[in-house]
Image: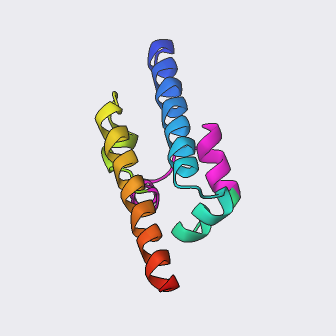
Amino acid sequence: MTTLQSKQKEKSLSELAQRIRAARRNARLSQDELGKSIGLSDKSISAYEQGRSMPPLDKLKKIAEITAHPFAYFTQEDPGEATLAAKLRSIERELAEVKRLLRAKK
């Protein structure tokens, strides 16, 4: 692997790490909660978020599901549209929760 390829791989891993962290925080989950929901430890989630390791695709798909982000958010170069879609899903989840709480109070 050339130095350029190595630097590109590091950049990609760093971007993925930032996206995993942002998705987890947007979903209001701790590292421990996210880890338990996909069958990993909080240490594994921390390693992904620090860019020390890359999650296997099956775990990345689970992270996408749990955080309500499209898989493309983690894999595409420009996540702009995926970010917007994830925010909309987050708002929809929050609205559904508010509706559920209102119905429970009646």
Q: Position of residue 14 (x, y in %)?
A: 55, 30
Drawn side of residue 26 relative to residue 92, left or right: right
Examine the residues drawn in magenta and state their main secondary structure.
helix
Queried whether the magenta region covers residue 77, the answer comes back as no
Drawn side of residue 103 relative to residue 25, left or right: left
Residue sitting at 60 percent across and 58 percent down? 29
Q: Position of residue 35 (x, y in %)?
A: 60, 63
Q: Which residues are magenta?
A: 43-67
**Which residue in the rendered view is the most extreme toward the front?**
106
Q: Nearer the viewer, residue 18 or 43?
A: 18
> Which color scheme does this rendered protein use?
rainbow
Drawn side of residue 43 relative to residue 89, left or right: right
Q: Position of residue 58 (x, y in %)?
A: 40, 60
Q: Nearer the viewer, residue 39 or 96?
A: 96
Q: Position of residue 40 (x, y in %)?
A: 60, 65
Numbered-mark total = 0
Q: Nearer the viewer, residue 106 or 6?
A: 106
Queried whether the magenta region covers residue 56, the answer comes back as yes
Residue sitting at 40 percent across and 46 percent down? 87
Residue 78's place in the image compared with 97, above or below, is above
Residue sitting at 51 percent across and 18 percent down? 7
The quadrant in which residue 42 appears is: bottom right
**Which residue in the rendered view is the most extreme toward the top?**
4
**Which residue in the rendered view is the most extreme toward the right?**
43
Residue sitting at 66 percent across and 57 percent down? 30
Residue 64's place in the image compared with 102, above or below, is above
Residue 102's place in the image compared with 54, above or below, is below
